[in-house]
Amino acid sequence: MTRTFVFARGIRKNAITFFILLLAFITSMCAVEVNINDRTRVSYTADNQGNSTLLPTLSALSGERYEPVIDLLLDGVTATRASLVLHQATPASCRQALAFALHCWWTNSTEKLDNKIWLTTQTILPQGLISVRSTSSILRHQPGLQPIAETILKPWLGGDAGISLLPVEGLWTASLDEAGHRRLIELLSLLERPQATASSFVPDPDVVDMRRMMREPIYATSWSSLMTTLSQSCDVSVAMSPHLCLRVFPKNNISLARLSLGEIAATCAVFNIRVFWQHGVLCLGEADYHPDDADREHPAQRRHLAMIPIGHLVSGPVDGELIVTALRQKVAPRWWEQPGAAIYYLASARALLIGADIPTQQVLLEALNALDRVGLELGIGTLGAGNLP
């Protein structure tokens, strides 16, 4: 739906909004094409644009205030440049494209009614207002739960934040911001009532139909023309890794026949370009860009807790720890290096406590299902090898 400014009821509000958008366009220091079709979709082209201009301009257009954390500012992010094209982009697409082009993570603000999107490279999340709260639980005489909680809540334990447990009384005292307190309550509730639970896979609402054909073939003589022609021909948003932008463009240029969107990745691989589709954005990275790094939402923010019973697979705690070790080493090994990622065997519940994003949880469930079919002794040796029945 095209947004129009109607000078009737609410004339002042619409007029002010119009002039803010106009000012953002005029003050842009680079050649930028801007078009807003409604409140949630933005079209915007920034070709190697300075971030000092890109961030405030995109904030004004999208309605979300993009704010680098202090560490990113000290690293000079505003003095660098980024390349992206937004085509009818939703808010999720805007965040993904911007964070990919800056090679950082994005995360929501913890403050209520704050429309701020933090940009960060830190494992610790930006903190809101810290408060101290005490929570009682039925988890008594279990001192080993504190290190588990500290690992799972690590992204919320920066600065003056912290948690402590009186194991005899089962009393937890936490100095956390609002998001941290919610995560602690979520964890304690799951530990007190260890019922089987896992996150369902929800399709990305911005997913692109890979069967759709490009409008026309592409011939690019620079990174800039590759980015813009891909967006125009595919009708999608495009973001380019800053490391790819620094690479010398192929001497023989880049030519792509009219393909389906699903065939673009294989064709670009010939030119040592790695292609990822994330939240409706065509992300272009260097050849060694890891797929696990393509989603630029902060890992702690997209992580969910799960409790998966494995009592039928184990005869004791040793078997449980063996399964945990095998899953860490062979199933999504890079995920376990992410902030807030965790996998523990809880002997009292005979279950796995897992902190992972939804795709990783799905892979773990498939691996455990395979172990269930072939048995622990046979399955543990072939886990992650791709040859389990």
Image: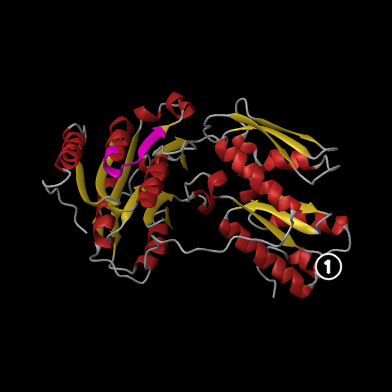
Name the foreground residue: 210 vs 385. 210
Q: Residue at x 21, y 34 (%)?
A: 28
Residue 64 drawn in magenta: yes
Give residue 293's position: percent from left, percent from top.
51, 48
Left or right of residue 287: residue 221: left
**Res 144 visible:** yes
Which of the 4 quarters of the picture holds residue 198? bottom right
Q: Most extreme residue toward the front, as rendered?
A: 9
Give residue 364's position: percent from left, percent from top.
66, 61
Give residue 118's position: percent from left, percent from top.
44, 36
Residue 389 drawn in magenta: no
Name the foreground residue: 157 vs 295. 157
Q: Residues within 10 Å of mark 1 (few under 14, many from 20)?
A: few
| SS state under label 1 | helix
Give residue 144's position: percent from left, percent from top.
81, 41
Which of the 4 quarters of the picture holds residue 102? top left
Magenta segment:
60-67
Q: Residue at x 83, y 43 (%)?
A: 140
- Kindly identify which residue carries mark 1: 377
Image quadrant where one finds the C terminus: bottom right
Instruction: Give, as a three-letter code, the residue at label 1.
Output: Glu
Name the foreground residue: 357 vs 163. 163
